Image (cartoon, rainbow, N blue to C red):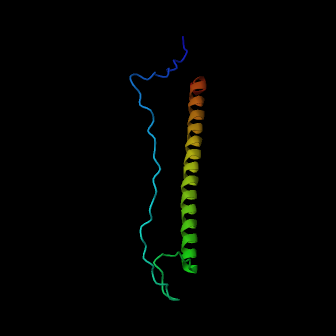
Amino acid sequence: MLRPKIPTMPTPVGVTAPPAVVQPTTVEPAPQTMAPAAAPGVPTARPTVQFTPGSVLAVVGAGTAVVLVVGTVLVSMLLATAVTAASVAVCAVVVRSLLTSPNKRRR
């Protein structure tokens, strides 16, 4: 009754073409012009990443700020959950007290 229906693999209909044969081709490199050798002290065309003490401090400071902000958000969410749970527990105790002792309030 509750058995899942497993779909069957459909059979191909009509004429199927054989897989295409890929012919290897040769790749001819484009002619390159020889650039003159760079003199010492002249910057090359390829950019290099250089870390200065200031940039390292900036990256470390930004990472620390991100960690502190994310940690603050997570702790505040946990605190909000704890406060909500405590208030629900207090409400439950009050409602239980009101429902179980109606005879004690009569005089």
Q: 10 or 94: which is nearer to us? A: 10
Q: Horizontally, is 25 left or right of 73 in the view?
A: left
Given residues 100 and 71, the one toward you in this image is 71
Is residue 93 visible in the rendered image? The answer is yes
Q: On the image, which quarter does residue 97 sit in?
A: top right
Q: Nearer the viewer, residue 32 or 67?
A: 32
* Residue 18: percent from left, percent from top: 44, 32
Q: Residue at x 54, y 74 (%)?
A: 58
In the rendering, at what x and y percent does residue 76 appear?
A: 55, 53
Q: Looking at this view, is 71 or 92 the one in front?
A: 71
Q: Is residue 47 above or below residue 42?
A: above
Image quarter in which the N terminus is found: top right
Name which residue lies at 53% across and 75% down. 49
The answer to whether residue 101 of the structure is visible from this angle is no
Q: For the point 56% across and 80% down, which residue is it?
A: 52
Q: Which residue is drawn at 43% across and 23% down?
A: 12
Q: Position of residue 61 (x, y in %)?
A: 56, 71
- Quadrant position of residue 29: bottom left
| Residue furthest to the bottom | 40
Q: Quadrant of residue 28?
A: bottom left
Q: Quadrant of the C terminus?
A: top right
Q: Is residue 56 above or below residue 22?
A: below
Q: Is residue 45 above or below residue 27?
A: below
Q: Where does residue 57 sit, x and y in percent of width and height?
A: 57, 75
Q: Which residue lies furthest to the top in this view?
A: 1
Picture mark count = 0
